[in-house]
Image (tube, helix red, strand yellow):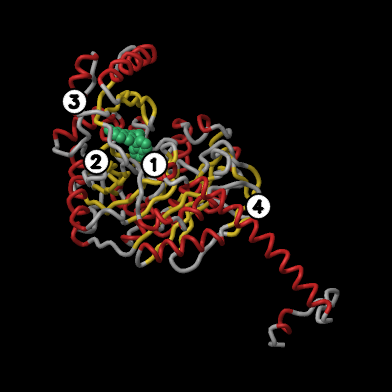
Amino acid sequence: MAMSKKITSILIANRGEIALRVIRACRELGIKSIAIYSDEDVRAVHVKRADEAYHVGPAAPAQSYLNMDKIVEIAKAAGADAIHPGYGFLSENENFPEMCDKNGMIFIGPTAKAMEITGDKMKCKAVMKKAHVPTVPGSDGIIEDVEKAADVANKAGYPVLLKSAFGGGGRGIRLANSEKQLRQEFEMASAESRAAFGKAALFVEKYLQRIRHIEFQLVRDSHGNGRHLFERECSIQRRHQKLIEMSPSPVVDQKTRDRIGEIAVRAAEAVDYLNAGTAEFLRDPEGNFYFIEINSRLQVEHPVTELVTGLDLVKLQIAIAQGEEIPFKQEDLKMNGCAIECRINAEDPFYEFAPSTGAVPNCNIPYGPGVRVDTYLYPGCTVSGYYDSLTAKLLAWGRNFDEARVRMRNALDEFTIDGINTTIPLYKTIMDESNFIKGDLSTDYLDRFKIFDKMNEDAKERAKGKASAAVASILLQSEFVKKGGAQPAAKPVSKWKMRGTG
Ligand code: MV4
């Protein structure tokens, strides 16, 4: 598939901040950007910024941003050369690249074949084992009977996890601490699986505890060149939703980075990967890395990598999609400084992350040295309940972790979003938290260090601080008035005069 057709226009099959991100890359490259929008997004900023915008359908994703037929129809009518799927929506649907191809359009992403393999966890694991990519010890494929399961578990050592091949995002995972428990869980899980899918598609893995989620950014071109763009540490999550990502990981030294990065490139080769993707690993406290999956899309957290490498991943995606070779060698890449990303979600962290949507009458978006914000927010916008809760990605870059962390902390103070609740208060607490500062991260970080209790305390303190500041300012003002200094009802003075220039 060494296609080499210069892309001159791209339809962006997405919305929100990622649509804006792709539009910016198009503008830089002189490529025409074509947006689509649902009824809900008539006033969305991606519609204003794109060169052209077309209505795709009603608010519901199935009838708009997931409607392949309609999207391809619009792309054809608009004369698009290529389609960028962003993340979510159609980005990992293996039918979409084929459909684009049939209609003479370039899909900016991996091939259907690579998507199909990476989308099937068991198949992917088997391919990786063959390619000598380390995977979690356990069964080679699906286990149909309980005796075989007990056998594998005894070899791997307890505790083990029973995973459903049809699960995903933490669904269909059961823990067994002993053979007795394994037998019970196996019977229940296979009955459940048979009822739902007609067969007991279970596999057994050693249960890794206190793990970190560390992933490597990958790019691979149609000429077979594969590169890794270092790691991102994504251990701070809640219910399999990432909240904070950073690069470098506090526990990855250069030797490990080179070693695991090379393995990640090998993983990409094993599935003949094309374009940008991510190899996910679990790291245990002993420092062992185990491959778990490849995400066959550009990820939410890709700007973390952009800040530490100086590369533009969307521009790179477009170059690869039009048949170009990746313009750098592995040894040309250097990691510069540290970047942290906080996902600003429209959810209430004080109330089980309940969705919080509606009008945003005003907002203040931070900026300044080392600060990047990818967002669709603007004063007067609306946050819709139909789509993903991500409203903004706040990133801070620094020469080292602490500079990035302090910049993030200050930017969080500057960031205000009126009308809705967001995850900002949680991140303020985390940026100040001693274990975060030490880099003591794991996927159970929030529970292990009782972060929500700390957040509640912090919020109380801040409320007190605000109340006393308000009282102090009233007192000050009354003092000032008593001294006869204030002229509250004075006629407005020209600002120019006040600055002493008039
Ligand atoms: C594991 C694991 C521990 N041991 N597998 C959760 C969803 C998924 N895709 C894989 N997951 C896990 N698999 C073994 N053998 C722990 C998790 C896990 C997890 C993984 C990545 C990021 C966050 C997580 C949170 C809880 C559990």
Q: Which residue is mark 3?
A: 140
> Which residue is nearer to you in this view: 413 or 93?
413
Q: Mark 2 is on which residue type?
A: Tyr
State whether residue 501 is above or below residue 321. below
Q: Is residue 196 above or below residue 478?
A: above
In the rendered image, which residue does mark 2 sit on? Answer: 273
* Residue type of the residue flagged with mark 1: Asp
Name the secondary structure under disc 3.
Answer: loop
What residue is rendered at 64% in x and 52% in y?
418
Q: Nearer the viewer, mark 2 or mark 1?
A: 1
Q: Earlier in the sequence, mark 2 or mark 1?
A: 2
Say if disc 1 is inside 8 Å of ligand 1.
Answer: yes
The answer to which of marks 4 and 2 sits earlier in the sequence is 2
Q: Amino acid at mark 3?
A: Asp
Q: Nearer the viewer, mark 4 or mark 3?
A: 3
Query: Local crowd at mark 3 within 10 Å, few (<14), some, or many (≥20)?
Result: some
Mark 1 Cα-neighbour bin, 10 Å: few <14, some 14–19, many ≥20: some
The numbered mark, 1 or 4, whose residue comes first in the sequence reads 4
- Using the image, tell me which numbered label, if any, was put on residue 444: 1
Pointer 4 local density, CA inside 10 Å: few below 14, some 14–19, many at least 20: few
Q: Which mark is residue 380?
A: 4
Q: In this rendering, which labeled residue sits more in front, label 2 or label 3?
A: 3
- Which quadrant of the frame does ligand 1 lie within? top left
Q: Are marks 2 and 3 in contact (CB under 8 Å)?
A: no
